[in-house]
Every structure is written in structure tokens, then in C-alpha cells.
Image (tube, helix red, strand yellow):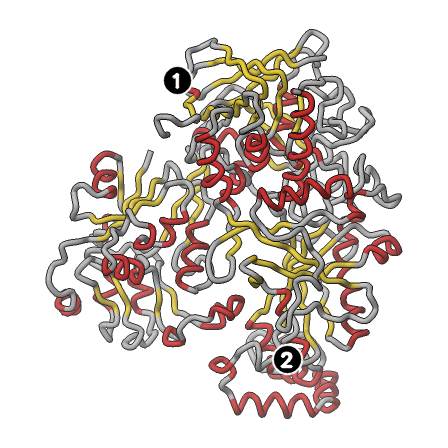
Amino acid sequence: MKADSMFHDARNIPADTTLTTDICIMGAGVAGISMAKEFMSAGFKTVIIESGGLTPDKETQSLYWGENIGIPYYPLDTSRSRFFGGTSHFWHIKLPEKGMGVRLRPMDAIDFEYRDWVPYSGWPYPKSTLIPFYERAQQVCQIGPFNYDPEYWSDDQRTPLPLRDGRTESTIFQFAEREIFFKQYKEELERSPQVSVFLHGNVTEIETSENAGEVTRLRVDCLQGNRFYVKARFYVMAMGAIETARLLLLSDRVCKTGLGNQNDLVGRFFMEHPHLWSGTFVPSSLAVSNSTRLYQIFRKNGLPLLGKMTISEKVLREERLANWCTSIHPDYQLSYQHYMLRDKRGVAAFRKLKSKFSRKPESGSIVNLLGDILGDPASITLAAARKIKGGFRKEFARDRHIAVFKLNHMAEQTPNPDSRVLLADERDGLGQRRVKLDWRLNALDVRTITRAQQIVDSSLRNSGFGYLNIETRPDKIPETIHGGWHHMGTTRMSADPKQGVVDPDCRIHGTPNLYIAGASVFPTAGYANPVLTTIAVTLRLADHLKQQMN
Amino acid sequence: MNLANTQSRRGPASARRWAMVIDLRKCFGCRTCSVACAQQNQTPEKFWRKVEELGLTQDDECQRFFLPISCMHCENPPCASVCPTKATFQRPDGIVEIDPERCIGCGYCILACPYRARTIYHRHLDFEIDDHAPATDREGTCTKCNFCKDRIDAGLAAGLQPGSDMEATPACVNNCSAGALHFGDLNDPQSNVSRLIRECRTLRLNPEHGTEPSVYYIIP
């Protein structure tokens, strides 16, 4: 740390000291840093308490460890980074030419609505309320204009597939560079006289007045033993959806079920974006195959962009589906198999018949196979010619052969009170109870993934653009389903204290000087990566706090 | 005899010997180094550089360790001694390199490498990033980490210091936001790697093979 830096080592603070400030932010991840930046020149003092240092260490990272008791999920100590910059250290999608980053887009308008087919759905305000904050979030992320219309980003090289039935649409993601938060904004915070960052300090309890009507101070423990306190006018939890819920549940001195948990909502409604590699898109022609460049990561005016396929809002309503999108990725082996016509009836039968003479014969009666072969001589002849010609492996290039694309789904998980974060009996290095994560999906989440593919398949066929091979079933959770490190929903927002942990201003119901910044407040999550919405909600909270301070 | 031939291609002793120090206390398994490597060298991810998970410590603390693995640029590289065409050779600065013109893709070196750091390159593996297709002279040949030698060489030519100046430093090191990766000159006692090796507990993998790797791991 620089000598004149506003970054401090909490381990050097004398035991039982009480730091006093106007605003205390718990956590220096994307939400915490975004909020602190807002207060750099706001005229009042802000303190950030960050559990980790500027680089990771094993002891601190292990505080995240917990048990997964639901759908198999990433080890919890590997799904977040517990040091300055937080989860932005995991942003490493390769960008064209250079750099790494993270996908960004706002949620759709329908994601904010109450949908009668999605229990517990609906934000307390519409998307339009967040638009000005989304626009500011774009600036925080240093990305392009707040425009996600695929036509806006189209050019001669890249256009949305013109699907005729309007049921399948294209959707655009922008990308932010990964180093903004932990490098550039770190330097800005270091120079800010208004913001002090205390590293290696773990908030272990939120202490309140006797009726929990007000937070009185935070208890901060360092792994090396010293304990101190922070007293502020306003407190903001920005620790991620698992740790925020955990700390509220742990702060049970007054509310025996946990702070803000009088209605048994804290930790419930944990949401991810179910991710899945499954199925393929087989274009009908070389022209269609070459018309998919919008759906590969590209740069326009220097900004990295990516197109995906999604379902129109009208169809989501008609079919009563959750939101969904898929990216498409060219795959060499699948493209080669398609080139060699192995998906054609005759060639497939010929290969099966051939296998009858091998050690591992494939299924199928020989009579039927012969029937298929005789019924499809054209594909066999063409495949034989291509086999003799050879050279595919050397000459293959996407602009000369049809590329077959793998699908990478990213779906909405709808709110589910049984999908939740719980406290475990086991304790961490600070003596705090660890967490258990019970990640669950419901029938709508699972059905959406298959039905959405059927709709896209129909759109492609109706337009003469090809088809999808669908491998999922509408009634079975795919075995390879996984998350995207998107933790959301555990302290959901609602105007009604019985339906939400925080109010529309992200203030904990019943505790007016305690707020939450982060994706834990999302009542629903759409399919968009949560970062942009997280920052937008955080900026809205920052404005609210500025008003409160004034 | 193979070893003798290998050494004969090393040329005169270099004033520098490049080494990498990996701080296992800091690596938290984000795998950014692997992505950076793939991007820099236009290979599929986990091709030249991968991060193995070693699991949790067997105590209440549940500390998880990771092991980034790539070519160790051994002082005594067994891959070079088995290469029938002498495609694998060691530069004077210690970097173990492969001449794609000589490599016939026989795979002996892959079997000889105790660190499983080598892979035969097939272009189709790279299809997903075909807009940035790699040089075709790699097709069917063995490839591996080369410490981003092009960056080092260009950086030195420009008067930069590998390990200190980002432009002259391997991509994995530059992109490690955990500060776990360090690169520098082992022959310079003032370099960051020399200092870390001197001041921290380090180990090198599989010392029983006598390979003398140039990659050191800082352990708790």
C-alpha cells in the first residue's frame, strides 16, 4: 500500500477501537466498489470493510467454504474471490484480439413484471425505473452506449438471422474488461480522501438496538485475533448473495431467527442462471452458416459484443415460459461429421452395418439397416466421394463448409423458496457457522430449457435455415447443468415485508439504517448476467443514501 | 548420446536463466492464467497451461490448494533427450523450445515429460477461435509453453526487463490478479524470482527425476 493511501490494514487497528464514519460498506467487490466510487466526492466519510487483502490468501478464502446439499454446484470456496475486487477476478472470457472480460446486458422488461405463471415474480418497480441507472452502470463498466438492439450493432458482416415467424429473436451482450474494478478503481479509491478501505477485516456481527430497529455498530474480527467496531449512520452489505444472507442469519442476538428474517425469507430464493452445453444447431446451407457471425464474439468500434438467440416476449407469455437464451459455438468434430453426412439415414445405417463386423457392434437389425442404405443411395455416394477426396481436415474453414454449432444455454431460474442458503453447524476460522447451499430448480425452469429449443427449432425450420438437435427432456434436470457463478435472490426486494427482506430502496424492512447492495436483492433474475443490474441497483441505492445524508 | 546432442544445441552459456515462481499460497484457482496463455498463444484453453485442483486441507480450516502446471523448462529436459529429430532443444537462456520444422509429432517427448506438459497440436481443437487461427506449421506437431519467448525476445530487444516490464513478461504472469505468478532471471540474485526462492519455502516438482525444473512453487 502506498504511504498516503486510504487503504489500511485492519489487523493493525488496536483491539476494541471503534471507528466512526457516515457510511460503512461491507465488502469491496463490484457492488461495494461501485457504491464507494459514488461517495468519493460526496462530502461525507465512507469506510469499506473488506475481508481479504489486495491479493488472496488461503485462510481468508476458506471462510467461504460450505456444503452443497442441493443440485451439484461449484465448491463454495471456489465460486467467489474473497479479496479486493471480488468476483471481478473471475471475469475471464476471452475477448477478440486481446483482453478478458465479462458479459453484460440489462434484464428484459418482462423480467421485472409480475407473471402469473411464475410464482413470486415481479419487482416492486418496472424496468423503466432502472433505465437511468443502467445508463450510469454502462459508464461504470466503461462499455458502449446503452443500446442492446441487435439491429443497432449490425453491419454488412453481422446481422441477426432473419427468422420469419418472429418467435425467436436475437439478443446482444456487451463486454467489460476485467481489470477495471481491482486496478483502475482501486487506484481511484486510494487517492480519495473521503473513502477509507480497511483490508483483512471480517464483519462478524451486525449489532442492533434492543428491538432491532436500528443498527448500532458492526463487530469486525481479524483472523489474527484483533477485534474492533465500526459505527456509522448507514450500513451497506455488499458481500454477495451467500455471505450477505449468512451474516444476517448469524446476527441473531436480538432477532433469534436472524436480522431481517422475521418472515423466514433470508437465504431463501437463491437463484443462479442454469447453464448447459447441450444440443446442436445445424444450418441448412453454407449461406446460413456464414450468416452467424453476429453470434460469435466480435468487436465493433472497439467494443466487444456477442449475439445470442432468445425467445420473443410474446411467445414467453403465450407459452408461459421463463426467460432463456443460448449462444452458438462452431464445433469442428460435429461439422466434420455433418460434412461426411453421418447424420443422413443411409450413411448412418452403413456405419452401423459396418460396426456389426467390429468388436462393438451397434444396435439395429441388419434387415432394417440394409433398407435404410438402399433407401438413401445419394448420401452414401456423396459421402464416399468426400472420403476419397479427403483433405477436409486441412482445408476446413468456416467460410467454405457448413459449421455445426454447439448450444450453450443460459436460462432464467424462477424464484423458489426451497432453493436456499442455510447455516451449518460446522464453524469457520473465525468461529462463525458455515453455510449450506441447497440449490434447487423447479419444473418450469427445466421445462423452459427444452421448450425454448423446440421454439427455436421451429423458427429455423420455418425459415429454411436448418434445425436444432435437442438433447434435453422437459421433465428431467439435465445431469450436466451448472451455474454461472451468479448468486442472486437471497434477500429479495419487495414493498411488502412479508414478501421481501429489503424494500424498493434496498433497505432491510424494519431496520432503517441497514441496506443491501448486490444481486441478493433481485426478486427475479431473467437470463442476463447480473453484473449490470447489480451496479444499476447499487447506483440507485447510492443516490438514495446521498439524499438521506443530506 | 541424445543428451549430449541436446546440450550441443544449447550453445554458449547465457547470462540469463529464466524461471517462474508460483505462490501456491495465493493461487485460488481462477484459471485466468490458463485463459491468458490460450489467448496469447492461440491455443485451446488448458492446452499449454492448466490449473489442477489439489483438494482441501484435512483439517477444520478447509483450505483449498491449486497447482498451475505448464512446461517446467527443465535444466535436464527428458523431452529433449528422447526426441529423435532433435526438434526439442534448450536455448541458452534455459527455455526449452520446439522447432516445428523438425517435429514429426511422434509423441516420444509426451511420454518422457513427467509433468504432462506437452500436447500434439491439431487445428480442429482450435476451431472455436478460428478467426484467430494459429500458424499452420504447428499442425500435427508437439507444442507446449515456451515462457512466451516472443514477448521476452522482443522485450529484450527493446531494452525491457522480463519479469518487470509487462510487455516483456509471459501473459500468464501479467494477467494473474492474485499476484501468485512471478517471472525473472534466476542468474540475477537481485531479481524477484531469486529473492522469492531465497526468502520463501519453495519446491520443484518431481525432484527424483533429476530434471531440475525452472518452475518453483512457494508452499505454506
Tell me residue A172's x, y (percent).
Answer: 67, 58
Give neighbour class at mark 1: few <14, some 14-19, many 20+ (Cα, 10 Å). few
Element at label 2: loop
- Identify the mark at residue A12; answer none if there is no mark: 1
Instruction: Tell me if residue B93 can be seen.
Output: yes
Q: Position of residue A549 (x, y in %)?
A: 65, 20
Instruction: Judge from the rendering whether residue A172 lies leftward or rightward of residue A453; answer left or right.
Output: left
Q: Which residue corresponds to the image point at 69% horizontal and 34% vertical from the top-left?
A: A540
Q: Say which quarter of the image contains residue A217.
A: top right
Quarter holding the N terminus of chain A is top left
First reached walking from the N terminus: tag 1 or tag 2 = 1
Between B28 and A315, the one lying in front of the other is: A315
Chain designation of label 1? A
Number of residues whose C-alpha sits closer than 10 Å to that of mark 2, classed few (under 14), some (14–19) or many (20 or more) = some
Residue at position x 74%, y 54% from top? A324
Question: What's under tag 2, amino acid-wise?
Answer: Arg
Looking at the image, the residue that sits furthest to the top is A210
Front residue of this view, candidates A307 and A279: A307
Q: Position of residue A116 (x, y in %)?
A: 89, 43
At which x and y percent is residue A502? Answer: 73, 27
Q: Is residue A382 above or below residue B13?
A: below
In this picture, is A406 found above or below A424? Answer: below
Q: Vertically, is B137 above or below A201?
A: below
Along the line of sight, the residue nearer the viewer: A540 or A333? A540
Label 2: chain letter: A
Q: Amino acid at mark 1?
A: Asn
